[in-house]
Image: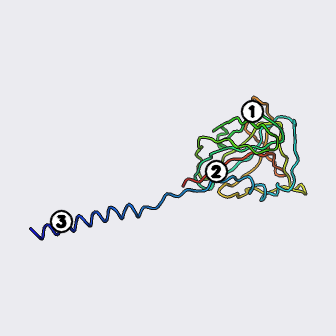
């Protein structure tokens, strides 16, 4: 009987030790830093070299296409334009289907000041192509000093920018931009992206 008690005690202590150590051995979940790809995009493309404000220049839907290199989520939109717009519309598109994933209105109450709108997270799939556009008659026209073209794709952290495009629009229309351009970027719009796995 003594031997049985001893064996039972050893087994109990062993199981308790295993259960405690397995909890301690679990790695802490990884939290990735959120990033905004705009600055890297501008620097790598050369479009950070020259900026000219365009105001009341006709209404366009314009922006850039991109692919995340990892699965993650967009947590906010950013906008900076050279004029006040209390109803600036920013839209995220699925490029393959040319359908709207999310459209938000932002109050840009001060010209040439960056505004951020926090969103319920929008999940993005690794290697899937998306397009972020804005509907406006104002933009910052960004070019290289010599006016030359840039080459896509452009790697900006975990986001790969695949191109810039625009289309003539109206304030009430949301039209997918189809006219690609390589010698400038009209902006500024962007987003905050956080890797999730």
Closest to the camera, between mark 3 and mark 1, is: 3
Q: Earlier in the sequence, mark 2 or mark 3?
A: 3
Q: Which mark is residue 143?
A: none
Q: Earlier in the sequence, mark 1 or mark 2?
A: 1
In the depicted view, which residue is nearer to us: 64 or 87? Answer: 87
Residue visible at 83% across and 38% down?
83
> Disc 3 designates what residue?
8
**Disc 2 versus disc 3: distance between alpha carbons?**
54 Å
Name the element at disc 2. strand
Q: Position of residue 129 (x, y in %)?
A: 65, 48
Cα distance between the residues tagged 1 and 2: 23 Å
Badge 2: few (under 14), some or many (20 or more) residues near its Cα, within 10 Å?
many
The CA span between labels 3 and 1 is 72 Å
Name the colour scheme.
Answer: rainbow
- Observer-side mark, 2 or 3, equals 3
Which residue is disc 2 drawn over? 193
Q: Which residue is mark 1?
A: 87
User: Quick check: 11 above or below 35?
Assistant: below
Q: Quadrant of residue 57?
A: top right
């Amino acid at each position: 009987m003594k031997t049985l008690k001893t064996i039972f005690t050893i087994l109990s202590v062993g199981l308790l030790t295993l259960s405690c150590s397995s909890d301690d051995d679990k790695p802490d979940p990884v939290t990735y830093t959120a990033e905004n790809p705009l600055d890297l995009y501008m620097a790598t493309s050369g479009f950070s070299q020259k900026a000219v404000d365009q105001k009341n220049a006709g209404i366009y839907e314009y922006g850039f296409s991109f692919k995340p290199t990892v699965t993650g989520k967009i947590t906010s939109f950013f906008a900076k334009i050279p004029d006040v717009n209390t109803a600036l519309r920013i839209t995220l598109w699925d490029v393959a289907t040319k359908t709207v994933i999310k459209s938000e209105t932002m109050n840009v109450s001060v010209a040439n000041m960056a505004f951020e709108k926090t969103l319920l997270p929008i999940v993005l799939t690794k290697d899937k192509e998306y397009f972020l556009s804005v509907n406006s008659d104002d933009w910052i026209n960004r070019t290289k000093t010599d006016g030359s073209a840039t080459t896509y794709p452009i790697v900006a952290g975990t986001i790969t920018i695949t191109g810039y495009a625009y289309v003539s629009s109206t304030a009430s229309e949301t039209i997918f931009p189809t006219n690609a351009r390589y010698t400038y970027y009209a902006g500024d719009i962007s987003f905050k992206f956080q890797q999730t796995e």
